[in-house]
Image (cartoon, coloured by chain):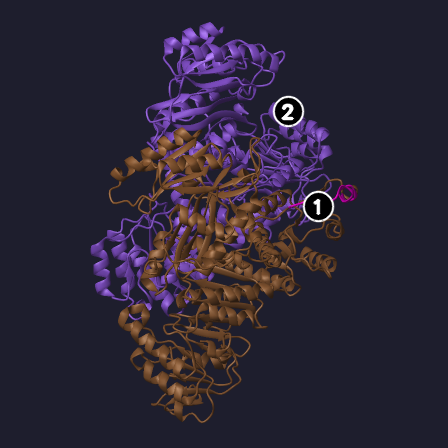
Chain colours: A purple, B brown
Amino acid sequence: MTDHGPTGLGAFFAPRSIAVIGASNDPGRIGGRPVDFCKAAGFAGPIYPVNPTRDEVQGLKAWPDIESIPGEVDLAVMAVPSARAAETLEACGRKGVRAVVVFSAGFSEVGAEGAAEQARLLEIARRHGMRMLGPNCLGFYSAASGACATFSTGLEGGMPRPGRIGLITQSGAYGTHLLSMAKARRLGVAGWVSTGNEADVSVADCLDHMVNSDEVGAIGLYMEGVNDVETLIRALKRARELRKPVTIMKVGASEVGARAVQSHTASLAGSDASFQAVIEQFGAVRARTTEELFDCLYAATTGPMPTGDKLGILTVSGGAGVLMADAAEAFGLQVPPMPDASVAKLLERNPFAAPRNPVDITAHALNDFDLIPEYLAEMMRAGGYDAYAAFFTSWTGSPVLGPRLRKVLLETLKGSDRPFALIGLFDEEQAVSYETEGVLTFADPSRAVQSLATMARLARGFDAAAAQGELPDVGDPVIAATGMGEAAAKARLAQAGIPALPEEVAPTAADAARIAGGMGFPVVLKIVSPQIAHKTEVGGVALNLPDAASVEAEAARMLRDIPAKVPGAVIEGVLVSSMAGEGVELIVGTHRDPSMGPMVMVGLGGILAEVLKDVALARAPVTVAEALAMLSRLRGAPLLDGVRGRPGVDKHAVAEVIARLSVLAAANAGTIESIEINPLLARPDGAVALDALILPVKGADNG
Amino acid sequence: MTDHGPTGLGAFFAPRSIAVIGASNDPGRIGGRPVDFCKAAGFAGPIYPVNPTRDEVQGLKAWPDIESIPGEVDLAVMAVPSARAAETLEACGRKGVRAVVVFSAGFSEVGAEGAAEQARLLEIARRHGMRMLGPNCLGFYSAASGACATFSTGLEGGMPRPGRIGLITQSGAYGTHLLSMAKARRLGVAGWVSTGNEADVSVADCLDHMVNSDEVGAIGLYMEGVNDVETLIRALKRARELRKPVTIMKVGASEVGARAVQSHTASLAGSDASFQAVIEQFGAVRARTTEELFDCLYAATTGPMPTGDKLGILTVSGGAGVLMADAAEAFGLQVPPMPDASVAKLLERNPFAAPRNPVDITAHALNDFDLIPEYLAEMMRAGGYDAYAAFFTSWTGSPVLGPRLRKVLLETLKGSDRPFALIGLFDEEQAVSYETEGVLTFADPSRAVQSLATMARLARGFDAAAAQGELPDVGDPVIAATGMGEAAAKARLAQAGIPALPEEVAPTAADAARIAGGMGFPVVLKIVSPQIAHKTEVGGVALNLPDAASVEAEAARMLRDIPAKVPGAVIEGVLVSSMAGEGVELIVGTHRDPSMGPMVMVGLGGILAEVLKDVALARAPVTVAEALAMLSRLRGAPLLDGVRGRPGVDKHAVAEVIARLSVLAAANAGTIESIEINPLLARPDGAVALDALILPVKGADNG
């Protein structure tokens, strides 16, 4: 795909000419709709219907085949049976078409034979230097160019309101539902694209294109599987640089859902937790429901973005104020109080008010309408808020009060660069009259606050990128693709700057006593054998040995008894190490997610954490700053700061270990399956790996 | 209040006559609206406007005062200034009015003076045997009688569609918003009531009334504080018996929100977790947002209730199927597969289908419409599903497909008693055409599934009531209202059937040794002093003592050193007890919530649980079955079943302790502040209290 430049999707979204192969005179048929839609959307260039049986299609001159078209064809739409797809695509190639949309189904989604046919299409497209959308897709729609290379019923009955929202979907049917819902909500749409089987063009490619398109202000994705994580991450990084909001709805989080994804697409679902971690890491947000997706896109394209998470709440109902304060906490916004001087001033103005934050003017505003602009102005002047939610219930829609309210609100907000969500009841005209001025409108206060919170999360994600710093230097990052048990793994990790306790393998009991004497007592002994993973269960661990005699006795016992318990185990000796002391046990590990690539994980060790599954994930590599952010996401994070009088641990040292491990995982993503430090002992004065294991990718083991 | 029968609110909602005191000829004014609304709603009885300055009000004969009205007055609406409220209420009493709505504000919500005035109103009402709604309320609306004793703008522009939803709200302003939103969503409303300051009639009273009203099928509450927990619980229990859904939105969950509640009402917020626990315990559900509240009420009054949590998903889009399966898991529904024979049969019929569950017919249904009824019928026949969610995207609203789809769906569903949610795009007429047949309509698949899940949770709550069993017999439940330290508390709890280890207080070191010898070694020693709560910190605990000599030495040390460390402490001796052995440490306790009354709590002990706040709450008393359900709600519940090869613990024994403790807490709610067992050691063969503490209510201590 690299010969097409970074994305090369311009010929899709802004083509100079469009051919529809299999064009129908019936605007309701699959081959008729693109012609009908392009005309309706005002596509400015030539539209070439291709139909060997007709001279004219929907009032346009028809052509018997694509090669007989006299002019250049940028974009060809193939509404042909799958059996004719390959030959049609070849003809497109000969014609010099730059981009092709393949509606035809019956490829990788129906099994191995179809997948082979799909590979053939891809080969043809690549050979001719064409980009291909599909097969088995519903095509796309571009508001700016009027190109409607789609048969989606979502365009029936009229185009969406033009606007700055980009929608990208793997599912044609659900994508159509999204388009229809967007129209029903009268959202402004810049473009919509359905990627289907993604033989060539993936959702990630489309994201990359829309991120770099000035016409698109915010992007919503609907995904079932990630086929192209590198492009996805590149596009997300670029969106973050440009501070362009991206919200992603990905299905398949549940067990049944993941199974269903596999049964109806060629995509591997991968781990949902890894997906979630990766998109947040690169500044996007996850939408859990379709309404969340649209609320985010609506807020992002209607008002300004906030620059922080402090919410000012203005209300004429105490109850609604409390409700919004609750929602703010639930969705992660702060509700800091107004300064005392402001509270006093506002109380003097209206003694019935509760002007702390929520700032409740009360229904007295009905008697003294000036209270509204005065209170809002004081919040804007003195409150330091990053966003506002204001509840005026049915006043917004009242024939008398509504226009008065609108006038004072818009006058007061003039010049403000902070998002303002107005909660009330609106008809469409009233809503539009606010939205064109950058004011968000909602009926449900919780959704208003959630949307502002999502904007704040996006803004935080954009800001966080700047503070991430450099990756740690781990020396030579390449790891031999060999399974490594405790001693070898700890030694290799130590080379990368991950500390372990002083330790040495003793081949005999006498050596063990001598080595322990050199380290100082107490010490720990552990059996060393590649065949023994669970040392405790075979009596292969002895803790807190106080002197040389006990070390020699224990080592002798292990070397004598364990070979009998584990026949065939190759015993390399006993590992002598210093006692670790007190601290908090963590587990730090890396693994390869089938979709998302190398991931790094940290969690609290011990039984409870295992039960409670309290872990934080990120795609490798991460910087120390990112690793610190991972630690702060653990529910058990307060343990690291010390509880019940215990001292806090050196979180920076833990983050160093996470970051270094992640660099190794990323550098060896093709050959190393997992690296695990379990436990990592976090202490007030550092962190040490007490045990470690490195596993190669199956088949990559060269040891 | 008892002289009015269980609630005695009939005179409000179904009055034979209404007087509006302070009636205005202007239908837009507070005193004009009730008259205007009653006429618009078709109130059948006489409406008596009271206005000394007019002969006629809005076309009705006006009366100079209430006592001059010739006929009986069931309901009086007081739209008068607060200064005239008391005299007006006296006049109502003399007239023999049965129920009064007081709009007037300026009472308990404005401070102590207002509260005194409010108490005077209540005294007047009680003296005359009148029920009073308010003051500072917006009144109520009843669809069946057409009684509109309200000035809420929510009735402007027309009454809500009549239906079976009851709405109860403490906040007038947010209540108005709810009423307006209900109208905008064209929900069917049976009644709406705003309780304001709740001097007499509380939300709980209104709930009790609506639960017992045949006109009301499901009830939504908006609350800020609970003023009458006993009535609330009685009403919830009755709703559960009648299987009438109740959903409650309570604000003030956040810190800022709770503070704001206190600043604008007289209500104490209490603990949100206690509120949540109590309403779930008695079969209601919590709505977190206004839309959740309405979705629940919509589902409960439109279709049948499910009898289990197995969801069948029918779809023409694989993606939407996955999305709904994810939502099912997130909201707690099961998505069990179709039987293999059915899968085979459906695949034979349409090889492109994925008919496991989600049952994806795919867009082939467009070519072969019979697939839809056939697949649905097979799901109904063989799937064993309790509810259905079916995604047909924009087909539902299509002029051609829509009516065909409706016909086959309704024919197939004929006679079904399971809820069916149809997801697509509908105009109002299309939606109504389904809803009148009991089919729910949604645009957002997640909201459809969430609503069905809420119905299933309600149904589970109704069913659970039957399986709760009896409270345990704890003997005499009354506890002396005295603070009790470890030994006394454990002894008292042992009388109630809560086991502790064998133990005895030894006054001297020699006694300790002798007692330990009788018990068998090893033993534990703990200092006994009412003044010493944290024994470990003063060296007052010694574990695992192996023989008489070490017992005597440790006891002597404690009795010698601790008095010096804690001057003034009365040392009663040392407690000798058996070692507890291995198990899982829990904390079980009771406390009095300021709003919700006596509560019982269980959580996992230890530092991690303290950090992770993993506890389950219920209102005391609870049965053993309810206590077992509490245990299963702990995130760390798998620990009790045994992990990593550890044996499971005796959960029934733990539940016995919880239930017994809860019976004690309920029986002594007026005098005992808290009882705590920390830790309770849960073992494979039982549970024992290792430490306990009983604290009396401040001022109730008679010790």
Camera-side mark, 2 or 1: 1
Horizontal side of B533 relative to B456 (left or right) equals left
* Chain under callout 2: A
- The residue indicated by pointer 1 is B361
- The residue indicated by pointer 2 is A123
* Chain under callout 1: B
Residue B462: give x, y in percent of width and height.
60, 59
Q: Is residue A19 or residue A490 the one in the foreground? A: A490
> Is residue B518 something one can see in this rendering?
yes
Q: Is residue B339 magenta-colored? A: yes
Residue found 55% across the figure and 64% down from its top: B237
Horizontal side of B348 relative to B69 (left or right) equals right
Question: Mark 2 and 1 residues: CB-CB less than 8 Å, in contact?
Answer: no
Vertical comparison of A28 with A72: above or below: below
Per the image, label 2 sits on a secondary structure element best described as: helix
The amino acid marked with disc number 2 is Glu
Vertical comparison of A201 with A422: above or below: above
Residue A581: give x, y in percent of width and height.
38, 23
Q: Is residue B264 or residue B294 the one in the foreground? A: B264
Vertical comparison of B565 with A316: above or below: above
Report the span colored magenta: B335-346
Label 2 CA crowd tier, 10 Å (few <14, some 14–19, many 20+): some
Is the same chain shared between marks 2 and 1?
no
Horizontal side of B481 relative to B317 (left or right) equals left
Residue found 72% across the figure and 38% down from its top: A52
The amino acid marked with disc number 1 is Ile
Per the image, label 1 sits on a secondary structure element best described as: loop
Q: Is residue B409 magenta-colored? A: no
Quadrant location, the C terminus of chain B: bottom left
Q: Is residue A65 or residue B97 the one in the foreground? A: B97
